[in-house]
Image (cartoon, rainbow, N blue to C red):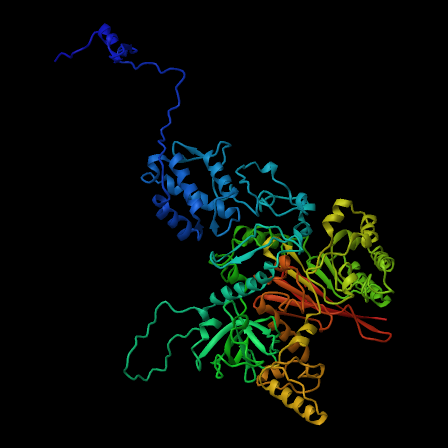
Amino acid sequence: MATLQRPLDEIAALSSSPAFGTPVHPILPTEQGRPLVQPAFKPVVHAVIAVKLEPPQIRPLAFRTFTKKHNLTLSASSLQALASFIGKHCGTGWREEGTGEKVLEEVARLWKAESGGVIVEDGTRLKTILRTLESCMSGGRLGQAKSGSKLSRESSFAFGNDSAVDLSEDTSRRPSLDSHRNSSFGMSKLQVDEDEDHDEASKDPRAWIKVHSAYEQPRFTYDMDKKHFVQPSNAPSLFPSPAHKTALFRERYNIIYQRLLRNEAFQAPSFSSNRATLARTDSTTTAQQFYKITPVANLLGRGGTSHLLLGMLVIAPTGTLALNDLSGGISLNLQHAQPLQGKDSAYFCPGMIVLVDGVYEEDWAGAGSAGLGNTGGVGGTIGGRFLGFSIGGPPVEKRSVSLGLSTNATEVGGGFGWTDFLGLGSERAIGDRMRRLEQRFLGLENEFASEQRRKMVVMSKVTLDHPSTLSALRKVLEQYAANIEQPLAFLIMGDFCSQAALASAGVGSVEYKEIFNELAAVLRDFPTLLKNSTWVFVPGDNDPWPAAFGAGASTAVPRDNVPDVFTSRVQRTFTEAGLSKEEVSRQVFWTSNPTKLSFFGPAHEVMIMRDDISGRLRRNAVRIGQATKETESQRAEVEVETGMDDIVMSGALPTAEDVDDTRPGTEPQSSNVAASSEDYITQEAKKLILSLLPQSTLSPFPLSTRPVHWDYAGSLSLYPLPHTLILADAESEPFAMTFEGCHVMNPGRLVTGSGRRKKVQWIEYDLLSKRGTMMDSWVG
């Protein structure tokens, strides 16, 4: 059958636009069945047809990827940015070809690798991630980057808060461990290959020690609406707005409240296996019970009913004890209350947030009554009173639960694991890798990590103006200098002067500088310790500058470090030992009080506080239960005998004679048989720990009792719990014990006793096992 072929001249006569007579290039037939030769230059044809996507179109896919799979939450602005990016670079095939889901998956991975928060917000970090992915898009699909690297967890893994995503696989440009000793553990500064061989200098664990001053730590505040920690936009100040004062106590309450609701005992069951029935059964199984917190304002009109309250103990203007929460306050009666942990188990002071179980009694006098004790409606205080039967601190939450780690510390769940509390990288981003590095540098398989090298020597109350203290310090240093391996670090805490410096006639600026000159004379005899160990100095109440106007009294915390004008001779001693100025800045730290030490990022956190907190707890503790009745009866007898007619305040403070209910040599009066067999020091140590850790702060007192810089109160926070808490309390005996995974230590005074022979006591802290050992010796 013949085919119709159009002549070549007729083909050339055709036009693509007949109306204008535009000629068209002729389509030449093939020669002998061979195809036409392709031109050398082929124009690029974009196969992606950009579309405009609205956020509701990708919301189900984003919810499945970010929330269900990665436990992240998208804000409205970030969802809009992702929709625009997918519509522009993935085109019409974003749904059918699955390219949109791959982009969302990689964005979520990069966000978590950069230690982003649980809420993905449209900001610099998200824009940087999208710009990086834009260079990897080809034909609407996510391919390799222009540099040839792949987008994977290994290549895009990031640490810290660095906003740049490092996609380069060039390991030759990776910084060594030794080149960033004193820098932040950033995203591009901790890329360490665990199989890579390092030189001997990089195996020094001191390269992973970071000292965090209270004035340099990141600030976080808990947002009750977002259920997450956010960073304030305003810069901290020593003279903030008065509104920050109320926010200080609101922040404490919100942290404890959210921590309490996460406890299993306060979570309502989703369903019950026991069906309601009126038939009588012989089963002894009881239905699952849970606790429910009642706001103070909800007590109105519910007289005679039992409730569980969470609030702060305060002293009302009328002198009575009261309980306040965010909704209001109520007068509190603790004459019949008993501590939840047992008698004399903890201190309860004004300023502490406690749980009180009891019965509400409405105001019997009516609304029109008047009197000194009636504070109904004044300052948010409701009428009536609350009779407390049980009182205790909120349950302590372990660090692993707060950060969302399971018991084996490898699987990740809920919590605040993505929050970078110290600016070194979050627990979920770098925690597992830092723990492997910790085992590599400090583990038993490392030949350079001997048992002595893993130690940190902790000394407190080092009063340098006493000759006996200098002798004791020299004896301790001689003991460690005689060993082949020196300790990794020395922690020396004040007060460095027994009197308030620059506030008394005997201790001026010249005299205070002389005591550090004496310290330099002692340190000069131990050059190996100066060269091979890290030294951290923490001031006390008698050190300048706060002592200059506080005269050694309880000044505002946090306190800054000892000024350099007094420590120049000590700094010069380290230089004379063979250290350069850069090495001195990396190994000698004059830090604030309180302060934090971190070893290997979030893998090991140590909180340090030099304060005589036990004495402050005893002075401000409230009497409850039977102790209140005995105190009131004793005072009534004294008033009858002396004719006094003073008003006895409810919840009066204890006197010095009433502090020690259980003294050495006497039988402690407790219903718990196990507690009665414990010694006095252990009981007091447990009482201090149970009083402080449930409050999630190092200063659970009113500002009138313990002043705090409002904007820097976050440096006193104990949430999440650190691995180790060093409470340098000179008024308590030394102890070292663990509670809820937090190891609490108190080195006590460096020198104790009187006479010719004095006792020297300090603590050796093992950085690998995270446990301390009390040490002592005699000097004289």
The quadrant of the image that shows the N terminus is top left
How far across and down, in percent of the image, does residue 605 sit? 62, 58
Residue at 79%, 53% (x, y): give it. Answer: 528
Is 190 above or below relative to 508? above
Q: In this view, does 272 lie to the left or right of 740?
A: left
For residue 258, say whether it is visible.
yes
Residue 554 found in image quarter:
bottom right
The count of marks equals 0
The quadrant of the image that shows the C terminus is bottom right
How far across and down, in percent of the image, does residue 635 sit? 67, 88
How far across and down, in percent of the image, does residue 520 sit? 84, 56
How far across and down, in percent of the image, does residue 695 sit? 58, 68
Judged from this view, the residue extending furthest toward the left is 1
Q: Between residue 643 and residue 222, name the one nearer to us.
A: 643
Q: Between residue 11 and residue 49, name the one nearer to us.
A: 49
Residue at 63%, 47% (x, y): give it. Answer: 184
Q: Between residue 359 and residue 122, name the one nearer to us.
A: 359
Q: Between residue 661 and residue 555, name the one nearer to us.
A: 555
Is 297 above or below relative to 4? below
Residue 467 found in image quarter:
bottom right
Judged from this view, the residue extending furthest toward the bottom is 641
Q: Is residue 580 left or right of residue 423?
A: right
For residue 361, say whether it is visible.
no
Residue 52 found in image quarter:
top left
Residue at 43%, 78% (x, y): give it. Answer: 302
Judged from this view, the residue extending furthest toward the front is 368
